[in-house]
Image (cartoon, rainbow, N blue to C red):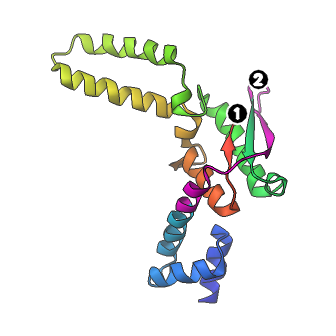
Amino acid sequence: MIEKIKKIREMTGAGVVDIKKALEEAGGIEEKAVEILRLKGLQKAEKKGDRQVGEGAIFSYIHGNGKTAALVKLHCETDFVSRNEEFCQLGRDLAMQVVAMSPKAVRAEDIALEEIEKQQAFWLKELEGSNKPEEIKEKIMTGKKEKFCQENSLLGQAFIKDPEKTVEELVKEKIAKLGENIQVGG
């Protein structure tokens, strides 16, 4: 039992008592316990979302060819966390994400309306020749818009190092692990 706790603590950074409870709830299965801790951490992260972020740091990434680079401003609550290695790694990863995926905005709602309208005009031309009913065309347009906004916003994109999660989920995991609100940009 102690070895399982140590292993899970190294993976998640969660407290020993929380790990014990998660293992009990999961019937001793490590993978289930880690998932339980992750979900509880995401719930904690949601609660911290309104807290003031007055500290932080700027992180950079320059691609190997030297022709593309990005700067990312990452905010947190205390200077202690802003110097934490996990926080710094998150900043470097986000800067690399920006270089690799070229998001148009940090959040989906921040994408310029002109950009969305330009895409919608293109999608309408695609649908012109189809014999689909209007309500189906509207649903298709709505779906395309949502997908476009997700793929072109930093927080909505799949994380390049782990495509199973979005960048927003990654940030929330770090909030849960570090115990402070973290915000990108601004």
Say few, some or many: other residues with alpha carbon within 10 Å of mark 2 (under 14 / 14 to 19 / 20 or more): few
Magenta residue span: 42-69
Q: Identify the disc placed on residue 67.
A: 2
Front-lying residue, 147 or 82: 82
Above or below, comparing residue 167 to residue 114 in the picture: below
Please name the residue shown 50% across and 32% down the image.
151
Classify mark 1: helix, strand or loop: loop
Does 51 appear in magenta? yes
Name the side, left or right, on which 96 lies relative to 85.
left
- Would residue 157 be seen by someone viewing this image from the given angle? no
Question: What's the residue type where badge 2 is placed?
Answer: Lys
The x and y percentages for residue 165 are 52, 50
Q: How far across and how far down the image is residue 164, in percent?
A: 49, 51
Q: CA distance from mark 2 to mark 1?
A: 25 Å
Tell me the residue that label 1 is attached to: 186
Residue appearing at x 64%, y 77% in the figure = 7
- In this orientation, which residue lies closer to the viewer: 161 or 184? 184
Within 10 Å of disc 1 (Cα), the crowding (few <14, some 14-19, many 20+) is few
